[in-house]
Image (cartoon, grey):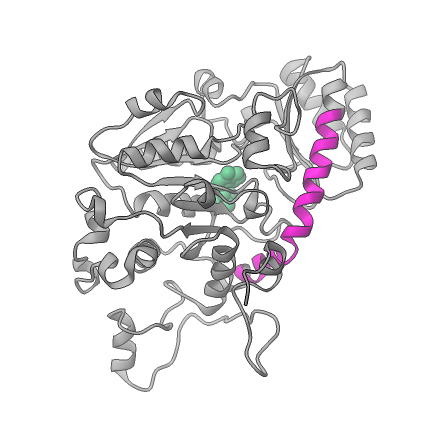
């Protein structure tokens, strides 16, 4: 069969039932699996056979949904995690440990910043945060001999900066490390980072992929393009025997395309247990089935709201890469030619107080710690998701105290614009 389009993969990817099998991905709501012979299960433990023995490591529902996301991103292997936080934790921790170092864009989600700058730092992994718009030379200067990865977000939450993926990939590869890209906001419908050189892609599937505010989840996708063996001294966890797993050498047994995800599953998921429930994977799959239909509508509303706000006298600044005035317009046209996402960030002339009044005056969009939902929602990051950052850190992440993050849902454009216009009158 010829390569299927992104819409067909969204609907039917990952799970292709045989004669008489359920049409929809079945929920295998079972923690465990039955065997007639101890050796049959032993072969699974030894990774000599494929199958399931305990849902903390793998489950058929999760695998089917991960396979769909893998197809959507054009990867070689993928896994689901319990949340986007777990996805980014695993993506880094799978290749970096105590004494290692990672280079990361400053423009990332506040929760990810906290995970990296505080929690992983406590675990001995050092991060250097770099301006994503820095030159290749400046980015290169942040690397050390113990650097194991480079990290960025395709569209950063909430600053909405657009990552120059090719530039980041070039610098990462020149230093012999993979580029990890969090592709939560555009989703593979609008950008496929692997096609631009990213090696590992992560998602908070809680956002557009689920799209209905129903299930927290995450995903990691390996491109299969990074040659771990060529940089064996940096990645011994993948290229030398794992004594905690019967001496398996992941690159030898599972090849370049399977090593990274197999290690993250058999080692990190086994030990840390941040598995997505099969029920949540089922909900996620329902969301994925309409992702290609929903994303253009989110973008249509995002563009209309951004254009409306740009002309409003009470609005100081609008950030949306679909606006010609936006500093990321060119990068947006390159990486996101069909649209970016439904998120629009803006600052009101009246600052933080006006932002609060505006949000409280909305009738359709609700104040929520969430984005990328079918229902529009709104948030002031400085007082909520990013409140752990000091003023300097907020500035580096491109977040003004009065910044409003407006997530355009799937409502009628006219109703959203009316709601915003009314709320602006009140502040
Ligand atoms: N990555 C990005 C870009 C996000 O926006 C978020 C959450 O908003 C996360 C990761 C964390 O995802 P989760 O809330 O599913 O743990």
Above/below status of 29 relative to 169: below
Q: Let me know if residue 302 is in the magenta part.
A: yes
- At 57% across and 20% down in the image, what residue appears? 327
Picture quadrant where residue 167 is located: top left
Coordinates of residue 166 in the picture (x, y in percent): 43, 34
- The foreground one among 287 and 337 is 337
Coordinates of residue 2 in the picture (x, y in percent): 55, 63
- The boundaries of the magenta stretch are 281-307
Q: Let me know if residue 280 is in the magenta part.
A: no
**Horizontal side, residue 189 vs residue 34: left or right:** right
**Horizontal side, residue 425 vs residue 392: left or right:** right
Coordinates of residue 199 in the picture (x, y in percent): 38, 45
- The foreground one among 364 and 132 is 132
**Horizontal side, residue 111 vs residue 173: left or right:** right
Picture quadrant where residue 406 is located: top right
- At 28% across and 34% down in the image, what residue appears? 122
Residue reaching furthest to the front: 2
Q: Main secondary structure of the magenta part?
A: helix
Residue reaching furthest to the bottom: 36
- At 60% across and 56% down in the image, what residue appears? 5
Coordinates of residue 133 in the picture (x, y in percent): 45, 22
Q: What is the count of numbered marks?
A: 0
Screen quadrant of the N terminus: bottom right
Above/below status of 60 relative to 35: above
Picture quadrant where residue 48 is located: bottom left
Screen quadrant of the C terminus: top right
């Amino acid at each position: 069969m010829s390569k299927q389009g992104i819409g067909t993969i969204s609907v039917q990817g990952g799970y292709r039932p045989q004669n008489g099998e359920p049409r929809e991905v079945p929920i295998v709501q079972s923690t465990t699996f039955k065997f007639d012979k101890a050796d049959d299960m032993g072969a699974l433990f030894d990774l000599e056979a494929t199958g399931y023995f305990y849902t903390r490591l793998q489950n058929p529902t999760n695998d089917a949904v991960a396979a769909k996301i893998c197809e959507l991103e054009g990867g070689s292997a993928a896994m689901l995690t319990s949340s986007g936080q777990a996805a980014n934790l695993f993506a880094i921790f799978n290749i970096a440990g105590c004494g290692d170092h990672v280079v990361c864009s400053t423009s990332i989600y506040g929760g990810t910043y906290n995970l990296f700058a505080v929690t992983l730092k406590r675990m001995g992994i050092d991060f250097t945060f770099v301006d994503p718009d820095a030159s290749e030379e400046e980015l290169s200067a942040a690397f050390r001999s113990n650097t194991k990865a480079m990290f960025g977000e395709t569209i950063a939450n909430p600053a909405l900066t657009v990552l120059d993926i090719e530039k980041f990939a070039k610098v990462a590869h020149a230093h012999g490390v993979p580029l990890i890209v969090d592709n939560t906001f555009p989703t593979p419908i609008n950008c496929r980072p692997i096609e631009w050189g990213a090696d590992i892609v992560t998602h908070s599937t809680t956002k557009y992929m689920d799209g209905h505010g129903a299930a927290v989840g995450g995903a990691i996708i390996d491109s299969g393009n990074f040659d771990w063996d060529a940089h064996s001294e940096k990645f011994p966890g993948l290229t030398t025997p794992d004594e905690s797993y019967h001496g398996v050498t992941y690159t030898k047994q599972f090849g370049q395309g399977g090593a990274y995800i197999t290690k993250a599953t058999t080692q990190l998921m086994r030990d840390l247990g941040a598995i997505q429930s099969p029920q949540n994977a089922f909900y996620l799959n329902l969301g994925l089935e309409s992702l290609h239909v929903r994303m253009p509508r989110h973008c249509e509303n995002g563009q209309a709201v951004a254009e409306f706000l740009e002309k409003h006298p009470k609005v100081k600044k609008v950030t949306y890469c679909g606006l010609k005035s936006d500093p990321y317009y060119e990068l947006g046209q390159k990486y996101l030619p069909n649209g970016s996402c439904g998120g629009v960030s803006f600052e009101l002339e009246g600052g933080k107080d006006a932002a609060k009044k505006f949000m409280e005056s909305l009738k359709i969009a609700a104040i929520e710690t969430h984005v990328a939902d079918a229902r529009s929602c709104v948030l002031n990051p400085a007082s909520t998701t990013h409140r752990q950052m000091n003023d300097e850190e907020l500035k580096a992440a491109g977040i003004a105290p009065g910044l409003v993050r407006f997530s355009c849902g799937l409502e009628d454009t006219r109703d959203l614009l009316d709601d915003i216009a009314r709320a602006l009158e009140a502040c």
